[in-house]
Image (cartoon, rainbow, N blue to C red):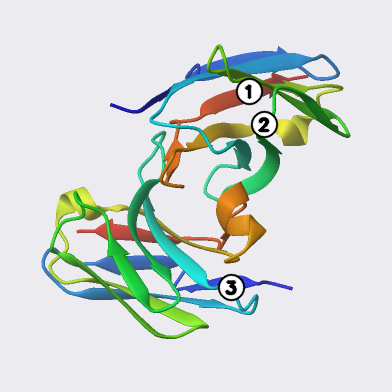
Amino acid sequence: GQNIDQPTEMTATEGAIVQINCTYQTSGFNGLFWYQQHAGEAPTFLSYNVLDGLEEKGRFSSFLSRSKGYSYLLLKELQMKDSASYLCAVKDSNYQLIWGAGTKLIIKP
Amino acid sequence: DAMVIQNPRYQVTQFGKPVTLSCSQTLNHNVMYWYQQKSSQAPKLLFHYYDKDFNNEADTPDNFQSRRPNTSFCFLDIRSPGLGDAAMYLCATSGAGTEYHTGELFFGEGSRLTVL
């Protein structure tokens, strides 16, 4: 079966750096995505990785290793507004999007 | 400016009373999706349309139906809601080109369904 694993919850301090990991086992691979979802709201697109390496976008970076079935989302200079769930999703060989359950990130002052 | 609009944002219904949720988009995207999301769970794909081609996920219950009368609108009908159908229902769109393959979805704000 297809599976996406990410930690259920993480806590970090305002101003710090946090890394949210995601491992996946899917039938084929056509890209990995990170979405941010604030409580009670819809997910918003953060990043897309299809090749190995690091993609940087402001305070957020996303890394992919296809050989390891592994990605992480790195958030720098954390702000209170970064408190949200972060969902990892993978497009499989049929271009179906397989979603993880999300990592709830709690930011403390 | 909202690009994917869902109505209503909050819907309360009684057990077994039919519900229709609507979604409209101004992006002119070919692909529209309906997801069900329960608290702390991954979004679960119910259906998607690629233009008029309807794709039903194998495990979507028959209780859920969908209509797409034109490019801009899509509806989710829940014929006889049960307590287990209480959830957030998310509509999303993507383009038929690069976005379809890159997976960038544009979500509406969701419709939260409560079943009494």
Chain holding disc 3: B
Q: Would you place residue B85 above or below residue B97 in this image?
A: above
* Mark 3 → mark 1, Cα distance in angstroms: 34 Å
Q: What x and y, as percent, mark residue B111?
A: 43, 63
Which residue is under mark 3? B29
Q: Would you place residue B97 above or below residue B87 in this image?
A: below
Q: Would you place residue A30 above or below residue A107 in this image?
A: below
Which amino acid type is marked by label 2?
Ser
Residue B112 shows up from this direction: yes
Label 1 sits on a secondary structure element that is strand
Q: What x and y, as percent, mark residue B87?
A: 33, 51
> Residue at 53% of width from left, 73% of height from top?
B30
Which amino acid type is marked by label 3?
His
Share a chain, discs 2 and 1? yes
Label at residue A76: none
* Mark 2 → mark 3, Cα distance in angstroms: 30 Å
Quadrant of residue B95 within the rendered picture: bottom right
Quadrant of residue B74 within the rendered picture: bottom left
The quarter of the rendered structure image containing the N terminus of chain A is top left
Which residue is under mark 1? A106
Q: Nearer the viewer, mark 3 or mark 1?
A: 3
Q: Residues within 10 Å of mark 2 (few under 14, many from 20)?
A: many
- Whether tag 3 and tag 1 are in contact, CB under 8 A, the answer is no
Label at residue A83: 2
Q: Tell me which numbered mark, 2 or 1, is placed earlier along the sequence.
A: 2
> Residue at 70% of width from left, 41% of height from top?
A46
